[in-house]
Image: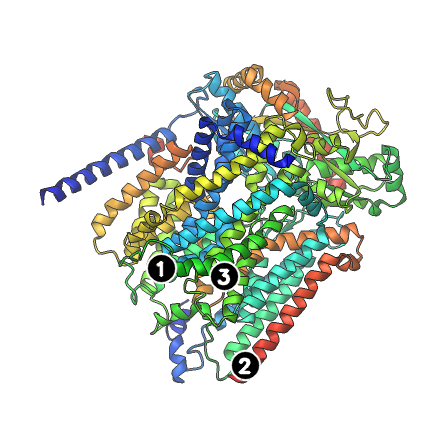
Amino acid sequence: MTGRLILRLTAAVLGVVLVGAGLADAHTKASGGKDPREKLQLMAPADPGGGWDTVAREIQSSVDAHGLSHATEVLNVPGAGGTIGLSRLANQSGKGNKLMMSGAVMTGAIQTTDSATTLDDVTPIARLADDYEVVVVPKNSPFRTVEDLMSAWRADPRSVAVGGGSAGGTDHLFAGMLLRAAGVDTSELNYIAYAGGGEVVTGLLDGGLDVGVSSYAEFAGQIEAGKLRALGVSSQSPLEGVDIPTFVEQGVDASLANWRGVVAPPGLSDAQRAELEKIVTTVHGSEQWQDAVERNGWKDTFQTGEEFRSFLESETARIKRISEELGLS
Amino acid sequence: METLSLLLDGFGSALTPVNLLLCLAGVVLGTVVGVLPGLGTAMAIALLVPVTFQLDPTGAFIMFAGVYFGGQFGGATTAILLNTPGQSSSMATAFEGFPMARSRRAPQALATAVLGSFLASIVAVTLVVFFSPLMVDLAVGFGPPEYFALTVLAFLATSAVVAGDVLRGLSGLGLGLALAMVGIDEQSGAVRFTLGSPRLLDGISIIVVTVGLLAIGEVLYVASRARRKPATETVASGRPWLSKRDLGRSWRPWLRGTALGIPFGVIPAGGAEIPTFLSYGTEKTLSRRRGDDEFGRGAIEGVAGPEAANNATTATSLVPLLGLGLPTSATAAIMLGAFQQYGMRPGPLLFTQEADLVWALLASLFIGSLMLLLLNLPFAPVWAKLLRIPRNYLYAGIVVFATLGVYTARSSLFDVLLLYVVGALGFMLRRYGFPVAPVLIGVILGPLAETSLRRAMAMSQGDVGVLFASPFAVGIYSILLVAVVGSTVLRVRRARAA
Amino acid sequence: MTTFVQRTASRRDGESASGSFWTGRSELFVGVLVGAIGGFLLLRTTMMDVPSSVSFLGPRFFPAVIGALLVVLGVSLAVRVALPGHRSTVPEEQSEMEADASGAGSDWKPLLLTAGTLVAHLALLRTAGWIVAGALLFWGVSCALGSKHKLRDLGISVIVSSAVQLAFSTGLGLSLPSGLLLEVL
């Protein structure tokens, strides 16, 4: 009898302790206010493992290593090319302890999804790094040069099956830019969307696709093995360590940077914005971050303040125009 | 023979105490996280990636391999015990596994799942070790017309051939396909059936549909029967081990499941769902032919087959991942990301450039499966004790569990709302005897069917003939024709006899 | 809704050939629903905005085919149920379920209690936080299914939801809503 009583008492005490600890935990999670040095929330508007998630987690590890904030957490809010996360951020006006990953993919998605929230509704903080689009063909393709591809497009644009990422993404937009550079109506593009660069590779290898567009990292293995041939890269100037000419060098007026950066909620004071810029600048200077740039094969294009804002403005306008031409919005 | 010595070297580098510990940690973590619907192995590996930078790549990938297999098993455990598959690949396991658990055969269901998984993984990994270059060629030969044929086969097999009533089966399939149409169309960027809600732009997640139909639907159904069968009683677990008879009934489904699962891991957009459903269908058809009507009430074949198929697919899906840099599942996608983080490029050159790592990874797959077997076989009866919890707590736990999993996957309240709405649909289907499998197959394969057909049309510039151009596709359509004609004849005969 | 409730409750009686046309025919509802979903797909497909650059089969093809299929299936289901001499044909998977369900259709009280709990949970999750809403969810469902000790179960529920909060946020590093009250404190 006493044995059971003791058992019950222990259970009750344990229960109370658990509830207390749970409440305390919920309380710490709830507080934290607006100070990024107390608690910094990094929102990745994508699934775990995707590009934005990688950036967020790289930032997190460098913030932690340098003790820039007491607590950092990565929050995944995937959906609709990042626009779900964007609209959530836009609703958290004045909260100076939140950063969201953003980039060229989001500017495209804002167009395709007809999102009510745009990048004008949040505070730009910094551009971190870029990667670029590569256009490839199978090794025995009749397209030896960019000019071959351009003339095929001029002859019969629908006969060239182009594969890349989802409709409205950077791959699609860049294919549209190329078509326009060839002087062909952009809406004639025969574009086939895939879930990622890996799937595009199989489409190219089995002969279904004539041309593939994706980021360099996705094709690098196959290019090295000689199964795919690169026609050009979308950067303005040649890339270090990548033996592919740019389109601009080859006389085709088309370039696109798949940039990644961070933005913060709207309604921040100048001091709040400066604080976040300071944290991101320290992250950028850290060894972890430079290491990450190297590992992921990105190009370091760090920008903050006015410089980043004006880049964002011109890039948004350019992407808007091309996606309208593609009939996406 | 060179392969063998490379593999032995791989074992050499994998079998250090530290790596064994990492593998164990991976298996345990994978099982724990795999149990939660929605989180699954993908999330576990994503959480681990930053942590593993402290480790050398070999150690990190050995840990990932552990998580990979552990997650598969965690998913099956909850499918059997709670009718809540931890991931979509264990859906088919729930169909027979849960009824088995309810009729006091949970330990047997778990044991046949563990053993089948082990057997399938070992066979599949062995094939990967010796034949992966050949398998890569097979993967590349698979284009949109072939995928389309395959999805048509899966649709008709689950809805018309396997389901007891064709009209109900096809309606279920149609509902599933309709659910799959919601969201942005990947091919054109057109917005479809979202009713203006941005929350629906990405479509209705498979996890929401699976957990809603199976778990929430089940709880509502139990509630609607609560007065007749008081839910407070416990389901006692019966005898703990597999009997000889169980083993005798399991080994053929294991082998058939393995054989079905292996090719599906290799083809790029396969995923583990098609083979698990095909295996479930095969076992069901075979048992019907034997005059056995245990299916629906907990037939061990219905657990053994799909689980073996699931794990065979998991193992062979490493072929496109390593050989082409092509991830066939969310988990594989994150592993691909991890490879890139370590500066490695999966692709044709990986096997030569990073030979040490690749062989250590393959060796650790063997070690991981063995570890999973040793860990879980003794635990099957222990897990099954979970069912001793009074049923009202158990079902309350299922609801809490399902809600949590769905909420935390995207921190979205809207997803929880969808979960409950789909649960109501699941209840209705259950109430009027509509099979759930065709709905799930429709949701999962609907997008693949649509994109394959549209890609095929775009590539051939609108020529329908391309669908019948390859011998593989023609082969599948012929099988389909025979099956449909055969089952119609059988039905008509049976109807006349009755 | 109430008419549907009554129809469903008396479904089985239809087999004894008593009652009105509606007895034993609540499955008509399913046919109507299937058909209605098909109609919705067709209607929305015609209203869809399609990007101008679409080639060959566009985004409207599949939904149109599925919509048409669902309309045909819905009508067939409804006709089959409405035909004279209809007996509810339950596929074999359901035989055991139906065996223990001999008697009337559904028990509405526990079912509505469970559904109500789900709705309440949804309404409370963001405002009251996980610990409260999660406990309510556990407690509500276990009561609906026939709990014998309601007060003790309330204690268990709070412990379960607190344990989950701890496991998720400290163990896995995933955040659950903490509620407005704690945010103010």
Is residue A99 among what the camera can see? no
Is residue B304 among what the camera can see? yes
Cα gap from disc 2 to disc 1, whole angstroms: 33 Å
User: In the image, what residue occupies the spot 52% across and 45% down?
Assistant: B121
Residue C85 % position (x, y): 48, 84
User: In the image, what residue occupies the spot 35% across and 48% down?
Assistant: B383
Number of residues whose C-alpha sits closer than 10 Å to that of mark 1, classed few (under 14), some (14–19) or many (20 or more):
some
Quadrant location of residue C10?
bottom left
Q: For the residues carrying marks 3 and 1, which lies nearer the camera in this image?
A: 1
User: In the image, what residue occupies the spot 31% across and 56% down?
Assistant: B239
Tell me the number on the disc at residue B436: 3
Which residue matches tag 2? B495
Label 2 resides on the chain identified as B
Q: Earlier in the sequence, mark 2 or mark 3?
A: 3
Number of residues whose C-alpha sits closer than 10 Å to that of mark 3, classed few (under 14), some (14–19) or many (20 or more):
many
Q: Secondary structure at mark 2?
A: helix
Which residue matches tag 1? B102
Label 2 in the same subunit as label 3: yes
Quadrant location of residue B492?
bottom right
Tell me the number on the disc at residue B275: none
Label 3 in the same subunit as label 1: yes
Label 2 in the same subunit as label 1: yes
Quarter of the picture holding the N terminus of chain B: top right
Q: Residue furthest left?
A: A1
What's the residue type where badge 2 is placed?
Answer: Ala
Q: Secondary structure at mark 3?
A: loop
Cα gap from disc 2 to disc 3, whole angstroms: 25 Å
